[in-house]
Image (cartoon, helix red, strand yellow):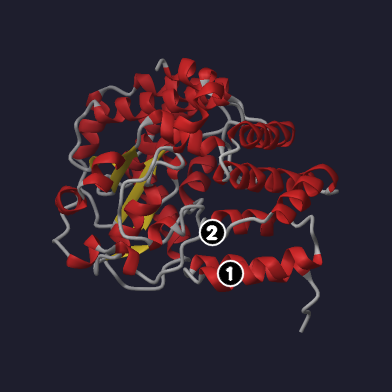
Amino acid sequence: MAPEVPVLWSNFGHDLAALGMTSDAAAAYRGAVARAPEMGAAWLGIANLRGAPFSDGDIEEMERASRLAPDPHQRIQVSFALGRALGDRGDFARSFDNYAKANALRDSIIPHDGARLAAFVEAHRILQPSFFAAVEDVPAEAHGAIFIVGMPRSGSTLVEQILASHPEVEGLGELFALEDVAASIGAFDNPAAFVGRLHLLTQGQAEQLGADYLARAGRYRRTVRPFFTDKMPANWRFVALIRRIMPDARIVDVRRDPMACGFSAFTTHFNRNTDFPNALADVGRYYQSYRRMMEIAQASATERLCDVDYERLVSDPDREIPALLDQLRLPFAEACLAPEKNPRAVYTPSAQQVRSAIHRTHDRFRNYLPWLGSLQTSLGA
């Protein structure tokens, strides 16, 4: 009906890519940039397809768009795509320059307050193991929620794809439902007051908040499977809230080598609704805040909080996947060993990676080590 509208071609490409139809997606993205060379979302879509190489003409067109596109968000997306394209060519210095340019521009529009996040985490230190132990004694209604948390680019999409291949689990992707519930009781107003409220919640109030979350998440359910996944990585901030309002919920903490994970996150475009650092040093500090929060939650050694080591998972899936299912008290399902065969739509930057059989990949960050000193320092690595 409107074949000359570039954004329609770009959106069409996103949907095709989510279904694993990479060649069709590439053609749709090409349809967008043919009509609007400054269409950053389309260039980024091509870059995320991985196997779609860029020509010299593409590089020149993207360099022009990264300077001249009228919308700063388009320039950000183009610069991320250019970083990927140049990295694939082995031009790591120019590649890193474009990643840095993209992050600097994003920071001018969507700044990250790392000090506020660190204060939020520190406020949770008053939650002693006895708080979580008390929660364990609360009768739990079967809600079926499985939260997959961790750093962005930690392997959480792969873990969700594995679990969504189980006949008892529905994968819902990244939901803002828990963040909305947290906001409703002041999570972003005053960290100390928010943690204090967790202590003072009555059982009835906690159950109502749990019901609120389930109602919000339920809007995205399409099956009657008994379990569902919420794969919002940043939900690590709310592990104490999860334990208080849904003590039966299962939490999967996906961990990856912090240098590999941090660099991958730095080179990933996050939408304007995602609060994530834009500088390498801040990425390292974000990782430290995440680890501190998980240590607070894990001090109680609750059986409903389990760890997944990404490197072990991709190196030995035949051993690690059954172990994960066992931790989650799910029966073994053969389909979980071949998540690449799951046809569900995946709308994350890892969508194309989970379409391949599980395998260990080269850590890209090693090609950029000369520029990663601030990340290493902030990680204490």
Residue for badge 2: 49
Q: Is residue 80 left or right of residue 1?
A: left
For the residue pair 364 and 224, the one nearer the viewer reads as 364
- Disc 1 marks a residue whose amino acid type is Ala
Identify the amino acid type marked 2: Leu
Q: Residue at x 46, y 62 (%)?
A: 346
Res 227 seen here: no
Q: Is residue 199 above or below residue 222?
A: above
Q: Foreground: 195 or 149? A: 149
Mark 1, residue position: 25
Instruction: Label 2, secondary structure: give it.
Output: loop
Residue found 72% across the figure and 70% down from its top:
31
Quadrant location, the C terminus: top left
Q: Is residue 331 above or below residue 313?
A: below
Residue 84: quarter of image? top right
From the top left corner, tell me how far across and down residue 279 is, in percent: 60, 27
Q: Residue furthest bottom?
A: 1
Question: How far apart in space, not on screen, are marks 2 and 1 (Cα)?
Answer: 8 Å
- Pinpoint residue 9: horizontal percent, then vertical percent: 70, 70
Query: In terms of sequence position, does the residue under pointer 2 or pointer 1 come before the other?
Result: 1
Determine contact: label 2, label 1, CB under 8 Å.
Answer: yes
| Residue 227 falls in image quadrant | bottom left
**Which residue is painted at 71% across and 43% down in the image?**
76
Task: Decide if residue 193 is on the left or right side of residue 149.
Answer: right
Q: Looking at the picture, how far across and down is residue 213, in whole percent?
A: 43, 53
Residue 7: quarter of image: bottom right
Whether residue 161 sits left or right of residue 31 in the image: it is left
